[in-house]
Image (cartoon, grey):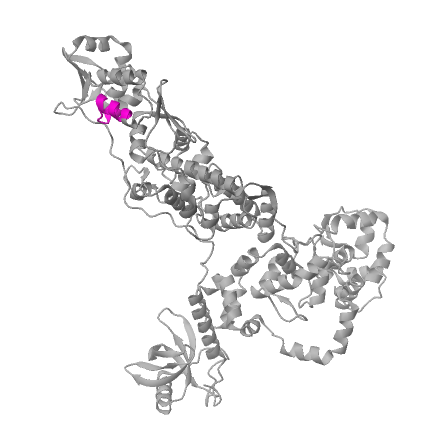
Amino acid sequence: MGTGRRSGRRDQEATNVPEASTAAANAPRSLAEALRARDDVALAALLHARPDLLNPVPGDVTQLATRAGTRASVVRALDRLDRFALQTAEALAVAPDPCPYPVLESLLTGTGGEDTEARDALPRALGTLRDQALVWGDENRLRLVRTARELLAPSAQRPSPTGLGPTAAEAVAGMSPTRIQEIVAAAGLPATHDPVSAVSALTGLFTDPERMSALLDEAPAEAHQVLGRLVWGPPYGEVTPNPTPPVRWLRDRGLLLPASPRTVVLPREVALHLRGGLAHRRTAPLPPPVGVHREHRPQLVDANAAGQALAALSTVEELVKSWEHAGPLVLRAGGLAVRDLKRTAAALDTTESAAAFWIELAYAAGLLATDGEADERYAPTPAFDGWRELPPAERWAALARAWLPATRTPGLVGEQDAKGRTLSALGPDLDRSAAPEVRRRVLELIGELPEGGVPDPEAVLERLAWERPARGTGDLRARLARWTLHEAEVLGVTGRGALSVFGRALLEHRDAAGPLAPLLPEPVDHVLLQADLTAVAPGPLLRPLAEMLAVLADVESKGGATVYRFTPGSVRRALDAGQTASDLHAFLTEHSRTPVPQPLAYLIDDVARRHGHLRVGAASSYVRCDDDAMLGEILADKRSASLGLRRLAPTVLAAQADPAALLDGLRAMGYAPAAESRTGDVLVSRADAHRTPARSAPVPVPDGPPVPDATLLGAAVRAIRAGDLAATAVRKEPAAASSGAPGELPRTSAAETLATVQAAALTGSAVWIGYVNADGAASQRVIAPVRVEGGFVTGYDHTADEVRTYALHRITGVAELAEDQV
């Protein structure tokens, strides 16, 4: 393993033995010592990079080091390394412990140091590992945190990403001494007196390049082929009870060692020799570049994105309004039924996956929620009404601000979870905590290109995979990135794949509505009526006009210009809402830039003439009409059989169906009945818009503990330093029994505690106390008591740098400080 050291460096080390010895004596002997040697800025940087270490705030540096070495914290830190920093950690996991810097360098660059990019990038990667408290020690004694080594080192159950296997010493553990001596003899080594020296001799052979080359020169050609299949991993291979001669030759000389009765393994030292000293087949010292794949004029990008933004506003508003009268039911397990998702997709004239995105976007923006009723449904929230009154640019900014940090992932809708259950829109299992970070990073990579620059999506994915090669989550992050590229385009954050000017403002936490507003068309107050019973809206309509037209006509097509179609059903809908024929004629005349076509005027008059001729009320229900001949015609129609009609009087029919079903049945037969109240007045059937109680938007699921701000970091560092000061303060030797091992809380009786703090208060001296607070957390403090009364001691706390009061019954013990202490 030491073959990677260059002779020049060895000569320098040989001539600097005293300096090396001094450095070794001053080197930290533990992670706690290494952390204690950091200044406050470096300690705060560690807590910022690994915020899980702050919960709760460590009592001192020793607690911080212990917590930094726990499995959960180390796994989280490893998952946030870039690819080359992770490869450096993996190389340290298969290196000697401790590992000199030249040995680590040779594992990443080869024995000849051919990989200059890796050599140049190694200091940065090693610095990252040091900053994350995953590596400590000086250059002569680099140590990977034990938990990280256990996670990254190769084993039979968990192969190493390097493809290396166990060392020769690990592989022969449990082998009989006789068999070890046979391997030593077959390898041409002199016999030894014990297995330990035999294994040491075998390891020395495998790490000596010249002797290993000579040994391999004697190997059969087929043996080299066997080694070639194992050298880059996996290092395990199956063998039969009677292996082939090449395998037997390798096994006899220890170049393959038994891992189980039917498995052999290639020792790590042999693999490294065959690899030329490399721990990885390929290193990735530099991030893959994300360049300009295509380029568009910035003005074209912004115009295209603005059009998408306007379409997004229209889609979200149409979606939410379609749920304000009879929204879909909430499933028992939460979420939207598949049939309701399909129905919504058909209403929006889009795919189910796109409908799921718009539904989740409206939900994330707080425009949709459950109403909380016994028969629970989804409905608009009161916030929707306020959102509709905002200018278009501000409405879009509200949607975009909700989308960017959202953890809910609509791309998962329709897939199955680990238990085989289908994930539904608005369901409880769509949160993915990595989504906001991936979404923002994708936009940042696009934003780093020149204005109008479009990246290759595959280059973006490669860059993300290098920045976070987290084990087991790479596929999810790649899918999140692809969904981000699509969602950003349909939402208008990007246009033709390039970041828009208002998308850039969103990314930089600036007002995105400002750059967007000039790009959106002004709402128009007119339509163009055509003879084919359609109306063309040449742009976005003013809200009152759009709302009235949505009642009077059906949307036929959308785009830059929306086309509405007038039908008997749509006209009847307007009449049901309380409008009269004259009202409709006046409305169209006022808002059309073209004359009202005669076919449209005839349609309105014809529907209005028949509207309300029949009256339906509640008996169970009835039909009333002054024309008894029409009632006879209805009775004679076979299609009315399901309504259960019978004549009560010449002008009245009774029905078994309820009023709503009777209305629908008669309309299906071609009549235009109107509902009436108990007093005989025509009912206006415009339903009141249903709103949920006030609801807040869903809170994104955090990806681990929140990143602490500067105030919290400063307070945490002061608390850690204070605890460390108390833990390392030198106490006077007690006159009687020892007060405990160093670092432990002192133990004194209540009487001794009271006497000592009273004496300190009289003399003005400082003492060291152990204290347990109301939450049961133990700490060590250095205080200068000034007052002792009422069961409390008040004094200046040197560790907290402030005056504090402590309950005497919570003080576990007290000790005087040495003369040279505070």
Residue, x 32% and y 40% (percent of image)? 388
Residue 174, visible in the rendered structure: no
The image shows residue 800, relative to residue 820, as above or below, that is above
Left or right: residue 602 compared with residue 649 = right
Camera-nearest residue between 479 and 704:
479
Camera-nearest residue between 249 and 9:
9
Residue extending farthest bottom: 763
Q: Position of residue 359 (x, y in %)?
A: 40, 38
Residue extending farthest left: 679
Quadrant in which the C terminus is drawn: bottom left
Q: Main secondary structure of the magenta part?
A: helix
Quadrant in which the N terminus is drawn: bottom right
Residue 804, visible in the rendered structure: yes
Q: Is residue 585 magenta?
A: yes
Residue, x 46% and y 60% (percent of image)? 707
Quadrant for residue 655, please give it. Answer: top left
Left or right: residue 474 compared with residue 3 = left
Camera-nearest residue between 578 and 708:
578
Camera-nearest residue between 573 and 560:
560
Q: Position of residue 160 (x, y in %)?
A: 65, 54
Q: Is residue 623 magenta?
A: no
The magenta segment: 574-589
Q: Position of residue 371 (x, y in %)?
A: 30, 41
